[in-house]
Amino acid sequence: MNNNNQLSLLLNDNTQSIIDRIIKKPLFDETCIFSLAARLLGDKWTIIVLVALMEKTKRYGELQKQIPTISPKMLVQTLKNLERAGLVNRKIYPEVPPRVEYKLTDFGHSLIPVVSLLCEWSVEHEAKLRKWSKK
């Protein structure tokens, strides 16, 4: 069975129809909606921060502890980008010192099934991914 047939078995008709429309366009064209989504989610930290926020609303310090390999500058940039994209809401409490919390918006919550599938895929292919990361 070729890859297209295998893919068709995994996808419902609507998803297959969407993929068929997308692959007929130049994928790196600025008008391609998939290209826009890939640019939004495709950097090193965005999905990791989204996964951390899928659990619950968190403060900056909690995110920093949960993702110790991200620099403070990159965490701030990633959170600002997610907020600008409408995926994350930032709430500032008028206290001294100020308390700031981050949580997924409804738009951000709409990514949970997609990110969950990616998490499942990574667990299923852990050995291959670990081998790749050592190269």
Image (cartoon, rainbow, N blue to C red):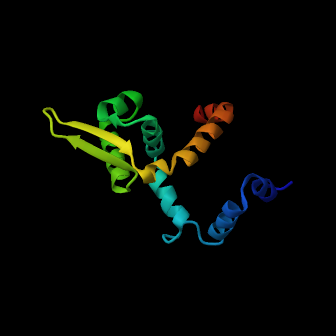
Residue 39 in the image, given as x and y percentages of width and height: 47, 57
At horizontal 36% and vertical 46% (from top left) the residue drawn is 78
Q: Quadrant of the C terminus?
A: top right
Residue 122 in the image, given as x and y percentages of width and height: 62, 37
Tell me if residue 40 comes above or below residue 74 in the rendering: below
Q: Is residue 85 left or right of residue 113?
A: left
The foreground one among 21 and 112 is 112
Dividing the picture into quadrants, the one containing residue 104 is: top left
- Residue extending farthest right: 1
Q: Is residue 46 left or right of residue 12?
A: left
At horizontal 44% and vertical 54% (from top left) the residue drawn is 107
Tell me if residue 77 comes above or below residue 25 in the rendering: above
Q: Quadrant of the N terminus?
A: bottom right
Residue 76 in the image, given as x and y percentages of width and height: 30, 43
At horizontal 48% and vertical 62% (from top left) the residue drawn is 36
- Residue extending farthest front: 106
The foreground one among 39 and 114 is 114
Residue 125 visible? The answer is no
The foreground one among 111 and 47 is 111
At horizontal 13% and vertical 33% (from top left) the residue drawn is 96
Residue 107 visible? The answer is yes
Q: Is residue 123 left or right of residue 43?
A: right
Tell me if residue 5 comes above or below residue 127 in the rendering: below
Residue 109 in the image, given as x and y percentages of width and height: 47, 48
Tell me if residue 85 comes above or below residue 29 in the rendering: above
